[in-house]
Each structure stands twice: as structure tokens, then as C-alpha cells.
Image: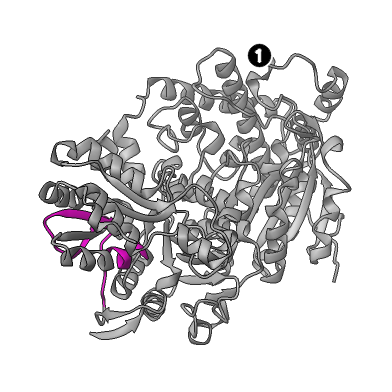
């Protein structure tokens, strides 16, 4: 019963699929670098938690999903938003607090959502997406059209109690749900080892949920594991759990330098993980296989940079939302809203 | 029209709406067996796919209701006792109440959380709360509290056809109450109060189980020459402020009866609304009949002493009129 997902590659992504994933990863990277600069320049109303370094996870998992499939994400959700088909300009405008943003500037970085793409939202509550994804999986099961739901969460969120509840119900009801735990080694500012007992990949096993632990900086490994898990879910075989071991190359949030007085990780550690950056790795693989020209990555990068620059101009030229957006998005009657 | 128990009226609303909308599902702890009787027979009628017994996992149940609703399946999430809303509160307060606004209006969350409220049967403090003040303060969930079988059915049907999260609170002591229930598509709009009794001397706004106390008090008061008007808001979010003000404009006096604890209660909110918008109508201070700021005890005598009842309503009205003879014993 306690089946374990195989670590071996059942099959590999085609060069076209791999190129598409590379494109997504570069889009996430450049969009977030831009938002990081905007944050440091004081151009953003709120904070940003960057996904830089973890792009292979979102790209490798979402490569298997269509617009009809659902994901829930975390406070570090830009990557999932973009990998699920969200547009950089809608993300950047949202984080700039503009009415042209994906959520009209009412959500901001930590809560960005695009329901037309099945992206049910980043979430400011750690672990907040777990039960929502399970509910979406229940809906998928009831509708019987082979949809799946994926919940992305971090190693820190794995300590939220609701995860155990969701493991139990998802296994009991054989929900088409894929748990993707991105273990980036830090629970906000605390090293995982100081706040996490045992091994994350062992936690779902007692529920009979197949589990695997993979190198989350290897997009091919992520793609393969996610393919197997998504396929199981589509076939009605129930939930699976993937631990993707990765690393947050930036801080918990961009503004942390302003309030943290002591380092919580060493420069050497960050540098050693920077050497395992998932983007050059996949570019090198494509180059070696002859599917990417010498300047192929640079070409992808230029195109993405153009798109990001256009998105920033779009965001900066956009208007801020007025109160009518609150009124339209909320359901409180206007009389109540305006009465005090 | 036929006379039915309040629990039976709720059961009919589930059946009619699940018949009408094949995507509507119901789940909760022991809903097959049905602790309160409201979900009895549904499992047999609609099957194990749409009516599900769940593990005791309130945090997951409320969150899943949000997710399934966003994905296209409206949910009746049965929470049993309202105290268990607390163990499932994150998804109600942080997700259900907020995601429509936070997604810029993209999300529709047709989730109805059903729970029983109120004391009076020695279930002690962890099974007897009336937590609508918390819910009223969330800024994104509707709150319905019926007092009659007809309103229970009509309000629930409205909730189940809506596209916004609603907490539907059943006054537990009123479950066996009999009343006329219209046949067929009986819908009660949200934000529309009902006047149960017309009167010219004092307005008594009463919620849920306290409506019967208010009506009982009104009979006592009539014998003493005071005509009370009894107004039942039926939904606390949205709140029919105009109906309350209209009544106070006529009577000039207000007593609010509410089974929640006094501090930041529905009663204190209603009193504040009238102070804001209807101060010039008032001939005397507003009185509140609520539960003191304490947990309800197990011992029946103590519990009864703390809960609103008709005598306390009479006493509050008497205090307004300054007539010591009207004081309850």
C-alpha cells in the first residue's frame, strides 16, 4: 500500500517542452528581479517575497497543467502565477497596486490570483492554500472531467496542522490532488532543521500517499515526478506528494535588510546554491543536446527583458484603483460601505 | 401551507436546492446520521458522492468549502455546534471572507456554513456560544439567523442560491418549534427585517431564539398598557438598518435582545446604528438584553440566570418607562 513514486525518469520532456519551461523560468527570474529593484527603489506599496532560485519547481509542475486544472500558491507566489499562464504585465501592475493588475490592485504580491487560468491565489496565510486546493480537487472529482489540483507550499507550511487534516481527507476520498512541498531550507528566517522534526517526505506515508523527494533545481526531475503524480490524479488514483529540495536565493522578503540585524545564513551557503542555479543548468543541457544555439539563452533573455520592460511601463502608466473597485469586488451593499 | 418543525424546514431547503442544483454538495461530521436531524435522509437521497461524512477536521472542511466553491461546486459545510467554527475559523475569516475582494472580484464563493447556536440545555461553555458578533466583524461573510421555520427555509434557500459565503446559524433551542411553512419556492431576501408584532410604544429588536422571548414579553407588556413592536432582522449581515430606524422613529424607544455576550454584540452594534442615524427619534436610552461577559455554566440554574428571557425583556422595557411596578419578579 505504501507505494513510493519512482525516482527514475519514466520519460523525459521533449526539447520543445524543455525550451518552454526554460522560457517560463527566465520570465519568472526577470520579472522578479524587476520587482526586487522596484521594491528597493521604494516604488511598491507593499512587500515582495521572491521565488528566485526555485523557478524549476513551478515550471516543471505547471508544464503538466491546463487552464482547467487548479493550483493554490503561497506568499512567494509570483512564480506559480506566471508558470500557470499569468501575464507579467498583470503581475507587475498588481504588485504596483494598479487597477490594471490581475486583481485590480486589491491583492498585491502575496495574494495574486488568476482564476481564468485556474490559479486560485497566492496566499498570505502560511498553509492557507492546502484545504482550498483539496476543495478544488473535490470539485474536480465531482465534475469527473479529469481535472487535477496542485498545492504548492513550503517546508515551513508543512508544520501547519491543516496539512495532516488534508492528507487524511485527500487519501480517504482519493482526491485528484498533488502536494508539492518546496523545501527551500528556511521557514521565514529560521533554518528548517531548527523547526522541523523528522523528514518531510515521510509525513504523508502513514496516510498511504505515495511520496518522492527530488532535486527541485533540476527541472527535468521536477517534470518527471510531477508528470507521474498528475497522471495518477487524472486517473483517479488519488493524491501524491513531492518534496522538491531547492533554495531561496533571495531573502524571506526583499525589505528584510532594513530590519534584520544579524545574518541568518552565510554568504558561502548562498553562493554554493547560486552555483546550482536551475536556469543555466537547463540551458546547458539544451545546448549540449543541440536544441539551443550558443546565444539561445541570451535571445530568450532579451525577449523576456523586453516584455518585462513593457510591463513596467504599462504598470507605471496605469491608474490606481478607486473605491468603486472595492465596491464591485466586495458584496457589501454600497449604502453600508458609504454610510460611515 | 403546512405546519412544520424548524429542523424539518431546513431539511426541505437542503432537498429542494440539491434537487435544483446538481453541483451543490453537503458535508460535515456525522451528517449521514444527523445529530440535529436537519440532514436526515439526504445521504440516501443524494448518494455518497454529494453527501459526505467527514473526519473531525474543521480546518480542512472550511477551507475545502472555499476551494470547491471557487472551483464551481457550491458547498453546504455543516459545522454542527457553532463553537466548532472556531477550530475552522482561519478559512472562514482569512479565505472565505476575503478572497472575493482580494481576487479583484474574480472569485465567487458560494459556501454556506451551517452551525447551531445558543445555550439552554446544559451543554456547557464549549457547546453553547452565539458567535455572530465575530462573523459580523469579518467584512465578507453574510450572517443569517432565522427564528421561525418559514424564515429558516427561506433564508437557507437564498443562501444556497447566492454566490457569497454565508454562515447560517440555527437557534438550537428552536429546532422543534412548529410554524407555517409556505410550499414551493419560498425565498426570504437577505437584508430585509420582518415585523412580528406591530406596536407603538417601544421597539424590541430580537434575534434568533430571543424572538420568542420578545413576543412573550410583548404580551405581558400589553396587559400593562404598553404596545411593543417586535422586529427581527433575520440577517445580521446585511442588516436592515432602515427597518429598525423606521420602527424606532415611530416608537421612540429601543430594546435589543441578543443571546451573544454583551461586549461588541449584535445588540451593541444595532444600538450604535440607532445612535448614529436615529438619535433624534429616541425618547430614552437604548437598553440591551444580552449575556454578561462570561462563559455559560453547566448548572441549569446558573445558565438560565445568564440567558435572555421574557422576564428580562419586560424588565428592560420597564426600566425605560421608569415604572417599578412593571419590574419582573
Local SS, label 1: helix
Q: Is residue A142 visible?
A: yes
Task: Using a 10 Å C-alpha cutoff, classify the residue at mark 1 as few (fewer than 14 neighbours), some (14 to 19) or many (20 or more).
Answer: few
Side (left or right) of A180 relative to B328: right
Side (left or right) of A227 relative to B133: right
Residue B104 magenta: no
Disc 1: which residue: A258
The image shows residue B219 at horizontal and vertical percentages of 21, 68
The image shows residue A337 at horizontal and vertical percentages of 29, 38
Magenta segment boundaries in residue numbering: B185-214
The image shows residue B283 at horizontal and vertical percentages of 15, 41
Task: Determine the chain carrying the residue at label 1.
Answer: A
Residue B210 magenta: yes
For image coordinates 52% across by 70% down, the residue present is B121
Q: Is residue B241 visible?
A: no
> Which residue is the extreme one toward the front?
B325
For image coordinates 17% across by 63% down, the residue present is B224
**Front residue of this view, candidates A244 and B6:** B6
Q: Is residue A263 above or below residue A69?
A: above
For image coordinates 70% across by 46% down, the residue present is A60
Amino acid at each position: 500500500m505504501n507505494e513510493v513514486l519512482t525516482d527514475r525518469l519514466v520519460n523525459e520532456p521533449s526539447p520543445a517542452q524543455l525550451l518552454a519551461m526554460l522560457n517560463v523560468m527566465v520570465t519568472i527570474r526577470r520579472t522578479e528581479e524587476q520587482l526586487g529593484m522596484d521594491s528597493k527603489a521604494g516604488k511598491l506599496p507593499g512587500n515582495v517575497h521572491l521565488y528566485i532560485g526555485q523557478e524549476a519547481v513551478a515550471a516543471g509542475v505547471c508544464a503538466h497543467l491546463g487552464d482547467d486544472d487548479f493550483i493554490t500558491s503561497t506568499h512567494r507566489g509570483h512564480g506559480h502565477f506566471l508558470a500557470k499562464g499569468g501575464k507579467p504585465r498583470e503581475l507587475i501592475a498588481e504588485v504596483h497596486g494598479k487597477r490594471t493588475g490581475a486583481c485590480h490592485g486589491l491583492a498585491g504580491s502575496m495574494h495574486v490570483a488568476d482564476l481564468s487560468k485556474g490559479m486560485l491565489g497566492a496566499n498570505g496565510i502560511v498553509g492557507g492554500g492546502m484545504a482550498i486546493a483539496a476543495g478544488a480537487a473535490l470539485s474536480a472529482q465531482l465534475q469527473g472531467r479529469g481535472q487535477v489540483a496542485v498545492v504548492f507550499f513550503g517546508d515551513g507550511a508543512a508544520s501547519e496542522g491543516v496539512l495532516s487534516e488534508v492528507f487524511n481527507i485527500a487519501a480517504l476520498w482519493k482526491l485528484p490532488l498533488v502536494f508539492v512541498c518546496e523545501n527551500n531550507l528556511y521557514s521565514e528566517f529560521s533554518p528548517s532543521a531548527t523547526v522541523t522534526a523528522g523528514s518531510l517526505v515521510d509525513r504523508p506515508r502513514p496516510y498511504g500517499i505515495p511520496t518522492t523527494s527530488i532535486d527541485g533545481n533540476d527541472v527535468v526531475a521536477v517534470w518527471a515526478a510531477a508528470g507521474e503524480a498528475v497522471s495518477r490524479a487524472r486517473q483517479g488514483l488519488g493524491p501524491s506528494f513531492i518534496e522538491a529540495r531547492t533554495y531561496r536565493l533571495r531573502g524571506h522578503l526583499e525589505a528584510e535588510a532594513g530590519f534584520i540585524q544579524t545574518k541568518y545564513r552565510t554568504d558561502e551557503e548562498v553562493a554554493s546554491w547560486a552555483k546550482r542555479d536551475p536556469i543555466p543548468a537547463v540551458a546547458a543541457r539544451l545546448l549540449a543536446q543541440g536544441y539551443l544555439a550558443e546565444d539561445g539563452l541570451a535571445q530568450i533573455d532579451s525577449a523576456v527583458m523586453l516584455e518585462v520592460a513593457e510591463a513596467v511601463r504599462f504598470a507605471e502608466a496605469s491608474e490606481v484603483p478607486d473605491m468603486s473597485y472595492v465596491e464591485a469586488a466586495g458584496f457589501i451593499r454600497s449604502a453600508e460601505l458609504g454610510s460611515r | 401551507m403546512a405546519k412544520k418543525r424548524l429542523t424539518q424546514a431546513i431539511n426541505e431547503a437542503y432537498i429542494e436546492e440539491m434537487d435544483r442544483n446538481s453541483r451543490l454538495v453537503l458535508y460535515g461530521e456525522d451528517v449521514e446520521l444527523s445529530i440535529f436531524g436537519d440532514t436526515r435522509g439526504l445521504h440516501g437521497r443524494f448518494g455518497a458522492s454529494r453527501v459526505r461524512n467527514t473526519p473531525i477536521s474543521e480546518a480542512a472542511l472550511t477551507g475545502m468549502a472555499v476551494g470547491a466553491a471557487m472551483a464551481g461546486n457550491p458547498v453546504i459545510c455543516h459545522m454542527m455546534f457553532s463553537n466548532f467554527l472556531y477550530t475552522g475559523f482561519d478559512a472562514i475569516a482569512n479565505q472565505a471572507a476575503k478572497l472575493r475582494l482580494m481576487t479583484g472580484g474574480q472569485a465567487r464563493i458560494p459556501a454556506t456554513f451551517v452551525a447551531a447556536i445558543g445555550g439552554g440545555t446544559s451543554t456547557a461553555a464549549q457547546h453553547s456560544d452565539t458567535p455572530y458578533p465575530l462573523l459580523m466583524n469579518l467584512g465578507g461573510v453574510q450572517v443569517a439567523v432565522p427564528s421561525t421555520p418559514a424564515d429558516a427555509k427561506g433564508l437557507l434557500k437564498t443562501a444556497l442560491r447566492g454566490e457569497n459565503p454565508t454562515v447560517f446559524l440555527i437557534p438550537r433551542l428552536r429546532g422543534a418549534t412548529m410554524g407555517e411553512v409556505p410550499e414551493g419556492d419560498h425565498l426570504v431576501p437577505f437584508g430585509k427585517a420582518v415585523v412580528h408584532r406591530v406596536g407603538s410604544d417601544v421597539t424590541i429588536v430580537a434575534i434568533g431564539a430571543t424572538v420568542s422571548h420578545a413576543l412573550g414579553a410583548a404580551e405581558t407588556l400589553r396587559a400593562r398598557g404598553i404596545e411593543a413592536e417586535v422586529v427581527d432582522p433575520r440577517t445580521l449581515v446585511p442588516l436592515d438598518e432602515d427597518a429598525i430606524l423606521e420602527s424606532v422613529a415611530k416608537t421612540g424607544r429601543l430594546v435589543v435582545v441578543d443571546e451573544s455576550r454583551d461586549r461588541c454584540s449584535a445588540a451593541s452594534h444595532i444600538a450604535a446604528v440607532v445612535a448614529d442615524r436615529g438619535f433624534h427619534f429616541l425618547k430614552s436610552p437604548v437598553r440591551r438584553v444580552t449575556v454578561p461577559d462570561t462563559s455559560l455554566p453547566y448548572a441549569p440554574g446558573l445558565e438560565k440566570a445568564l440567558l435572555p428571557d421574557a422576564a428580562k425583556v419586560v424588565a428592560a422595557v420597564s426600566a425605560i418607562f421608569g415604572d417599578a411596578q412593571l419590574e419582573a419578579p
